[in-house]
Amino acid sequence: MVTRITGFSSGLDIDTLVKDLMKAKRAPLDKLTQQKTTLEWQREQYRDLNIKMIDLRNNKLFNYSLEGSLNSKQVTISGNSSAVSANASSSAVTGAMTIEVTELGVHASVVSKTGVGQVDKTKTLAELKTAGILDYTLDSGKVNITINNKSIQLDETDTLNSMVAKINANKEMNVTAYIDAASGKLSLTSKTTEATAITWDNSTGSLLTKFLPSDLPTDVDTTIGSTAKVVINGIAVERNSNTFTEDGVEITLNAKSNGAISSLSIKSNTDSIVDSIMSFIKDYNDLLESVNNKLNEERYRSYSPLTSAQKEEMKDDEIKLWEEKARSGLLRRDPALTTMVDNLRLAMMTSVTIDGASVNLASFGIETGEWQQRGKLVIKDEAKLRAAIEADPNAFEKLFTQQTKETDTAKKNSATNPDNGLFNRLSNILMTGIESLSSKAGTSKVSTSKDAAFLESSLISEQLRMLNTRISDFNARMDRWETTYYKQFTAMETAMNRYQAQASLFS
């Protein structure tokens, strides 16, 4: 350790001299630190765009691709609108249907007349048996329940709540169970409207005997089920439920028609489809604008990141304005992003082959805007869009969602693959861009969090490691230089003290 002596003998401000000497030495270190800051800023800007790319690909495109988003159907009922209600799925066949309800279906049921009295449904079967509320015989340590000739096994640790849940979950039993805690009554209701009765095991030792002692009218209320009888487009049919699906239309029978027919009209829900495509266009354009803004942002090369010393000499507003310039244009003309944008624009304008015919966005009134909009999509003719959707809704859906049958990887993922729908093309292009940014900047391939860690294997991460090493090495050299300067000035002061002491002897 060097003992630092101030300039008592020389009268020099040694600390200031060393500081000025070190300032000159610091210039290369400042350049390294500025390079590091620039890379960190650049990496953050890559992450911001990457988040938008992942969100569009993994969230928004996924939702737009879901069944019904671009092929929504609607059904309207005229005539007797109270006898039936209906909802159309995206697979519904467009056209007309008539419904006449001859008989509503009846669900078979059995209900306790007396029950077991007030009961805690959260207590175990063993606890309720000990209390004398239930009675049953174990079979190999299990409690058996048989309904409609189908059996399940319970543990004594099961509760009445879990028993009901297990009965309801059993598809073969085909019943819905319910126990009223206040009266201890049990009801079993058939899930379908079949012409049959519910059967159960009420033999000695059966758990159900306490709830449903027998099938006599004096002990239980029993309802025999019956099928629903309807006339669909003039054809008399029976259904095992008052709610059923015909050609993609879910129909619910509410009341007998009494001769008044219900007429159903099924067609595309054009309003919903147009809303979906408008929402997609907005999301697509937002991403395109964000990337294009960065690709074309002005680069101010004379504005480097400020050093700590420079910031000390500036006001906050001045620092803010300077750093806005310094951060500008860091992604200007980036090759990976440029390629992605070019492919996105190409993919959206290239036709898709659907059932042997070429279909593109222009045929639905959707085009790119003026040249200065850099590939943004616009609905040039909404009336044309609506008419084209109504004329061929399936073609419109396939234009976006058709899955390619191409097996060659390069052709399959091509931005111009004619067999691939637009959403699938965009998904492939965005994934390629996401992977490129991950390799270069270390951004996540799946996360949309601004706090997600950067991958250490990326190009920028490697560059930052090298810069950190050089900065660390340079700081060590700076320490050595500073020590050397102080040694030199200390030696000078020591010598001057000695000369002054000798001179005083002869004065």
Image: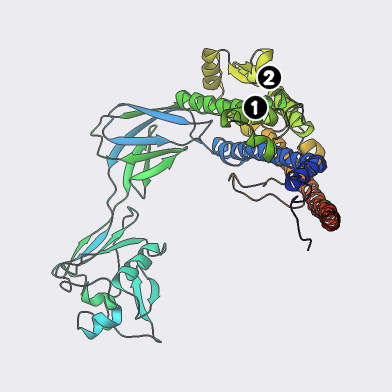
> For residue 102, which quarter of the picture?
top left
Task: Locate residue 477, reporting x and y percent.
Answer: 83, 52
Give amino acid for label 1: Leu
At which x and y percent is residue 266? 43, 28
The Cα atoms of the two marked residues, 1 and 2, are separated by 8 Å
Q: Which residue type carries mark 2?
A: Arg
Task: Tell me the SS state at disc 2.
Answer: loop
Residue bearing the label numbered 1 = 288
How packed mark 2 is, by other alpha carbons closer than 10 Å (few <14, some 14-19, many 20 or more), is: some
Secondary structure beneath label 1: helix
Instruction: Compare marks 1 and 2 and give the one earlier in the sequence.
Output: 1
Q: Is residue 215 left or right of residue 163?
A: left
Where does the image place residue 329, in percent across and percent down from the top left? 72, 28
Q: Which residue is mark 2?
A: 374
- Asked whether disc 1 touches disc 2, contact meaning CB atoms under 8 Å apart, the reply is yes
Placement of 459 over or under 371, stated as above or below: below
Of residues 177 and 192, which is closer to you in this image? 177
